[in-house]
């Protein structure tokens, strides 16, 4: 959960960056998230090379009560799709992203919400990034799972 200071809370492996789309592999990211009470100023869940939307990665992202977006970026060029969902307080969401060098599939609770075929960050080392920022309490990241179909 957040501590009320506006500090970002979450899980990441952005320093080690163990995942990369190359060599024909498939990356699969999944996490289960609960947000109670107020809605955070921003949150995102997925893979990124740095904590910045102007770089490389693929994530679910939203600001406050704005719609949850499926987003990916390559060298700062963004592709985004509104999932048609906004946060429902005290609901649990399962976010899943399946990425290859040719497409990225974004699922919420097992339902495909977006397919992107442009601005895919191929060949870039990325790490897991699950952040909730702001005064949201309580909030939980129940689990995070990220796998690669091949060692690259």
Image (cartoon, rainbow, N blue to C red):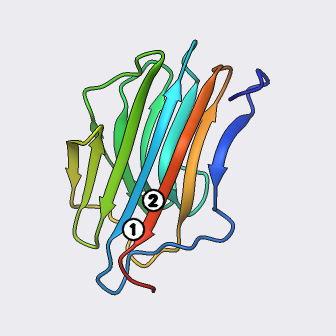
Residue 138: quadrant of the picture: top right
Q: In terms of secondary structure, where does tag 2 sit?
A: strand
Q: In terms of secondary structure, where does tag 1 sit?
A: loop
Q: Which residue corresponds to the image point at 39% horizontal and 68% vertical from the top-left?
A: 121
- Residue 19, compared with residue 38, is above or below; it is below
Residue 92: quadrant of the picture: top left
> 80 or 22: which is nearer to us?
22
- Residue 76, compared with residue 10, is above or below; it is below
Neighbor class of circle 1 (other Cα within 10 Å; few <14, some 14-19, many 20+) is many
Q: Are marks 1 and 2 in contact (CB under 8 Å)?
A: yes
- Residue 123, compared with residue 32, is above or below; it is below
Which x, y percent locates residue 39? 54, 18
**In whole angstroms, how far apart are the C-alphas of marks 1 and 2?**
6 Å
Which mark is drawn over residue 49? none
Q: Find disc 2 in the rendering and name its residue.
A: 57
Which mark is drawn over residue 121? 1
Decide if residue 141 is on the left or right side of residue 3: left
Which x, y percent locates residue 85? 30, 25
Q: Which residue corresponds to the image point at 32% horizontal and 79% vertical from the top-left?
A: 25
């Amino acid at each position: 959960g957040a501590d009320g200071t506006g500090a970002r809370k979450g899980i990441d492996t952005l320093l080690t960056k163990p995942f990369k789309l190359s060599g024909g592999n498939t990356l699969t990211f999944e996490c289960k998230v609960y947000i109670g009470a107020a809605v955070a100023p921003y949150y995102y869940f997925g893979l990124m090379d740095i904590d910045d939307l102007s770089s490389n990665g693929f994530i679910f992202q939203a600001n406050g009560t704005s719609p949850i977006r499926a987003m990916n970026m390559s060298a700062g060029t963004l592709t985004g799709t509104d999932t048609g969902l906004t946060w429902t307080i005290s609901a649990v969401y399962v976010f899943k992203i399946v990425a290859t060098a040719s497409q990225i599939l974004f699922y919420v609770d097992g339902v495909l919400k977006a397919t992107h075929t442009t601005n895919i960050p191929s060949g870039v080392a990325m790490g897991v990034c699950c952040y909730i920022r702001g005064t949201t309490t309580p909030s939980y990241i129940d689990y995070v799972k990220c796998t690669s179909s091949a060692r690259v």
